[in-house]
Amino acid sequence: METAVKILVPLLKKIPKYYFLLLGVACVGLILFVIFLTTYFQNPQGEDITIPEIKITEKSPVKTVKTIVVDVEGAVFKSGAYAIPENSRVQDALIAAGGITQDADQKYFEQNINLAAKLVDGAKIYIPINGEDILTTGAETSTVGQKVFDKIKDKISVY
């Protein structure tokens, strides 16, 4: 055995190093080829392949959301008209407007703005600025409830 090593070592030193790299790449390629062949012959092309049955169910129709447009003005971050879902509340409209600013009249807001009130199409919400005289601003001062009453008052009969 020692004689074989003594003979092979000088021969291996004479072989350029890039040949060893080529030999390594060839070995890896041979291993991958053997793996491919064993995989290919385990599932021959002639075998029937069963495809699982896919059941297609009918989807329920897409529900369209009806919207209303409300105007939010005053001490809010983004004043303007907003299209929101039909059964929205005052709080939803204020969220759409980015919320109330720090200079909003907090006392008026807490006493007069009902966040749970349902909105109707065309409603206006005005949040006064702190120190603002609400009666002289010219802003619409009716509440959402008054707007609802105005829309249905012709349909009310009192006997």
Image (tube, rainbow, N blue to C red):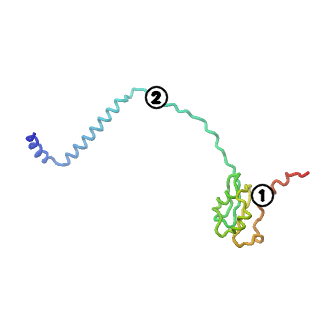
Which is nearer the eye, 128 or 13?
Answer: 128
Left or right, 95 with reference to 120: left
Q: Which residue sits at x=22%, y=46%?
A: 21
The type of residue carrying mark 2 is Thr
Residue placed under numbered mark 1 in the picture = 145
Total of numbered circles in the picture?
2
- Above or below residue 122? Residue 45 is above
Query: Picture quarter containing residue 114?
Result: bottom right
Name above or below for residue 110 compared with residue 13. Answer: below
- Find residue 113 and report its horizontal and vertical position in percent: 72, 62
At mark 2, the secondary structure is loop
Q: Are marks 1 and 2 in contact (CB under 8 Å)?
A: no
In percent of width and height, residue 90 lies at 70, 58
Task: Tell me the quarter of the image containing the N terminus.
Answer: top left
> Tag 1's secondary structure?
helix
Q: Viewed as shown, does residue 23 lie left or right of 49?
A: left
Q: Is residue 141 positioned above or below 121 on the image?
A: below
Q: Between disc 1 and disc 2, whose residue precedes?
A: 2
Q: Which residue is denoted by mark 2 in the rendering? A: 50
Q: Position of residue 103 (x, y in %)?
A: 66, 70
Q: Kindly indicate the quadrant of the structure image that contains residue 106.
A: bottom right
Q: Crowding near pointer 1: few (<14 within 10 Å), some, many (20+)?
A: some
Instruction: Give how far apart the Cα atoms at labels 1 and 2 are.
Output: 66 Å
Residue at far right of view: 159
Name the foreground residue: 15 vs 73.
Answer: 73
Mark 2 surroundings within 10 Å by alpha-carbon count, few (fewer than 14), some (14 through 19), many (20 or more): few
Left or right, 3 with reference to 102: left
Which one is closest to the eye, mark 1 or mark 2?
A: 1
Residue 5 against residue 101 in the figure, above or below:
above
Q: Nearer the viewer, residue 87 or 15?
A: 87
